[in-house]
Image (tube, rainbow, N blue to C red):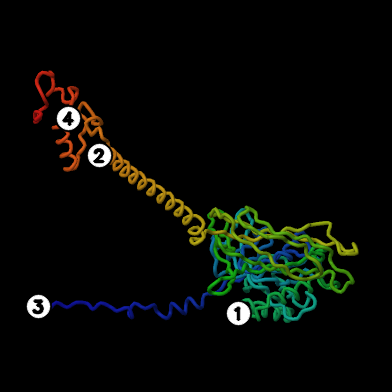
Amino acid sequence: MYAWRRPVPSLWHLRPSPHIFALLMSAEKKLLVLAFYADGPYWEDVVHLVGLPSGVSYRWPFRYAEKYVGTGARKLLSDEGESKHHEHWEVIVGARFIADRDSHLFLPLRRARIRAHRSRKNLYTFWFTVGELWPVGDITKPSEQAVPLPSGVRGKLCFTVRPADVEPSSAETEEVAKWQALVSALEHPVQGDGDDVSQWRTLTSALCKEGDIKINDNAVHAVFYRLSQPCFERTLFGSGCVAASLLRKSTLSAPVYGFELKQGRDYEVVLQYAVPSLEGKRTTADRIPITFASSRNMLTIGPTQEPLVGNYGEQSIYMSVAEPDGGLDQLLLQGAGEGLTDQGGEHKLRVVSTSFPVKPSWSFWVALRTRVLPLFGLWFGLSILGLVSILKGIVEAQLKGDLDLIARITDPGGDAAAARRGGGLAVVQPDCRLRDLHRACRLHPDPATDHAHRHRYPSRGPAPHGRGRR
């Protein structure tokens, strides 16, 4: 009988359901706010946040006690548990203020993305990578960029932007509108013109304005900087910039993101610097000693680094990979810290040191050119010399044998006098030579010392085959 078989579905039947795509697209992003007190002891974060290149891991994690974490944030972290990879956790990193007149304001500085978090013993820790600068527009003072916080999160430094944390009162209509605009900008980021340098200059100039939101004096008189991504020049395909990527996974803390630098390339990092506190004053910063270094000496930086001069400008730093060992390195920007003033000596300035991770890596072509090819050339040369020596020995042996043969032929004493006794190997002679020896034996018989078994006694007569005289 004919057996019925169930038809095998095609690949089209195995396609995912459109409802799955709808579910994935509708997944709610977990939006957090991480803040610090810009007028407190953590004023260095103001300089670091606006200065590091996009995509790298921040210098240190943000840690908060439980009282500074909002209710919605605690619930979100408890639901997620301890995790080390949060590609979908977007963050606004900004400044809060301790002063009473500014305690209700939040100043967004930069986008970020959480890479790991941990909550242990009422202490919440966040590791993140910095993103793009928060768009500032044409502001002239920080109060134009600051957003009033709803009353439900004014005492918090880590909170979500969802209603679980943000529960404004009905009297906060204007503040709610500003907050909703900030949330909308975070959920639907608008691509800027790509000129981060101009936004950085506008933001740093606004931060140091007098008579507005007050930040720490050390941050006001700091030398602000902006580091670019490492760029390199190719010989065949033009130039390019290195994008930040995952450099190392960690089972204890958090993954490390930075730039992977390959051996055999020359990289350039552009340093933009500015001293906003001296703008509008009839003086400029004295020589600003800023140097770059490698924490593990796997990078060659140079050849020289001149001090910075003026209130703003830029400087290019050139580097290359020296001897990578497979580990991570840090590109350090080191400053003079204290003792720096303007030319008149009236205004004190500060240079904040910073760093970001890099990973020097091997290059196959560089290893082939600098290690494999020299070793192969050395081996090939020694092999040729050995072969030449062997051939020379063979030729010399052959020539020596031919010379000995010629000497034996031309020697009037014949081979009998030079022949070896006692079982030595006989020398093969040509036919003409044998005939000459045979004729010589007839004319001049061998003495009694030759062929002793034939001439034991002289009275036995002449040698064999010998003929008497005629």
Q: Which residue is mark 4?
A: 444
Q: Which residue is mark 3?
A: 1
In front here: 17 or 250?
250
In front here: 130 or 151?
130
Above or below for 439 versus 130: above
Measure the alpha-carbon separation of dots 4 and 2.
18 Å
Q: Secondary structure at mark 2?
A: helix
| Residue 409 appears left or right of 299 | left
Which of disc 3 and disc 2 is earlier in sequence? 3
- x, y percent for residue 310: 81, 69
Measure the alpha-carbon separation of dots 3 and 1.
64 Å
Mark 1 surroundings within 10 Å by alpha-carbon count, few (fewer than 14), some (14 through 19), many (20 or more): few
Q: Quadrant of the C terminus?
A: top left
- x, y percent for residue 184: 63, 79
- Which quadrant would residue 428 be assigned to in this image? top left
Q: Which residue is mark 1?
A: 188
Which of disc 1 and disc 4 is earlier in sequence? 1
| Residue 22 appears left or right of 61 | left
Measure the alpha-carbon separation of dots 1 and 2.
107 Å
Mark 3 surroundings within 10 Å by alpha-carbon count, few (fewer than 14), some (14 through 19), many (20 or more): few
